[in-house]
Amino acid sequence: MSFVDHQNNESEEINWFEDDGTNIGMLNDNGRNAFYDHALQIIARDKTVVDIGAGTGYLTALAVKHGAKHVTAVEASPKRCQFLKNMIEKLGYQDKVTIVNENYLKTDIHSDVVVSETIGAHIYNENWLRLADHARTRCEYMIPEKFSLNIDLYENHPIWTTCMQESMAFNYNESNHPEFANVLNNEMQLEDRGELANTIPNLFSHLHNFNDLRLNKIWQSPPVVVDHMQPMIIPEIVIPQQVFTALPLKLQRLSPDDWLFLNLNWHATFQTASMWVSDTIWQNVCKCIPQPKSDLRIYFSEQNNKWLFQTV
């Protein structure tokens, strides 16, 4: 797994546009902020709360605002801890907050509630699966508690590859000199690179404002619910080959041999509080693929720290 060691690998100054725990875009994310505010309003009063990856202390401050008995703010980065300490003092919350400069996985802190915003573009790429599994035996409530995941399958459209980020929108498929492609792929030793997911930012947050893109959603998977108060599982979705066999009947303008676009939707909840990825600045996990001739397995790879799209 590849997670940053903040204790030994960080600059002295906070970069408000690059640091993952003190990012101004994240702090300005109204959808994210509304979810955590609602969730803590539901549960924090008179409870002890642990904030994992406290960063600037925003979730800690929300917990205090909503009547938490005491908050333990756990932050691995010494730089952020110093900033967090300064924020807590200026807010006058010293008597309500304990700051712990440590990797949460190395602690044994028990509380009524655990809250964390360690979610990334690939949902679990900031180690949330392991953090949640460590927390579930040390708390009664967890925010977020559940993730509901599903795949939306679309006809190909230029908008997908125009908006995609990370790696390449398409797999490397050099037809002019296939022998060169094979040698290069072997030399790179990235056999699964073509299976790694891409991400697409902002598009689905704004789609409802447009009706002229002619996007054709042709299938949607049943939701897979990941309950983080239960023992850890590696989330995956399998699309059976029969779905792809039936596609020619649903294609509006493309041939059955054209590429498809797969979008991973997620929805985080805690009791009546909910947060859709399209309501936030987080990106959608996605992939453009040629139509599979077998089942397609979509799963989170802890080794790659990304989602993979793999025919089986």
Image (cartoon, grey):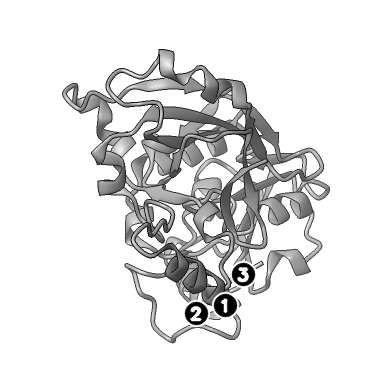
Q: Check whether the beta carbons of the residues at disc 3 and disc 1 lie within 8 A of each other.
A: no
103 relative to 109, above or below: below
Residue marked by disc 2: 79
Q: Farthest top residue?
A: 249
Q: Position of residue 131 (x, y in %)?
A: 70, 56
Q: Position of residue 253 (x, y in %)?
A: 27, 22
First-in-chain label (2 vs 3): 3
Could you tell me if residue 196 is visible in this image?
no
Q: Is residue 58 positioned above or below 147 on the image?
A: below
Crowd rating for badge 2 (residues with CA inside 10 Å; few <14, some 14–19, many 20+): some
Q: Are marks 2 and 1 in contact (CB under 8 Å)?
A: yes
Residue drawn at 56 percent across, 72 percent down:
186
Amino acid type assigned to the residue bearing label 2 in the image: Lys
Question: How far separated are the C-alphas under marks 2 and 3?
Answer: 21 Å
- Label 2 residue SS: helix
Q: Quadrant of the N terminus?
A: bottom right
Q: Quick check: 78 left or right of 169?
A: right
x 75%, y 51%: residue: 135
For mark 1, what is the residue?
Answer: 6
Residue nearest the viewer, comparing 106 with 60: 106
Quarter where residue 286 is shown? top left
Q: Residues within 10 Å of mark 1 (few under 14, many from 20)?
A: some
According to the image, label 3 marks what residue?
A: 2
Q: CA distance from mark 2 to mark 1?
A: 9 Å
Image vertical order of residue 217 relative to residue 290, above or below: above
Q: Position of residue 100 (x, y in %)?
A: 66, 70
**Quick one: which residue is furthest to the left in this view?**
212
Could you tell which of marks 2 and 1 lies nearer the N-terminus?
1
Quadrant of the image occupied by residue 257: top left
Callout 1 amino acid: His
Is 284 displayed left or right of 71 in the figure? left
Label 3 vs label 1, nearer the camera: 3
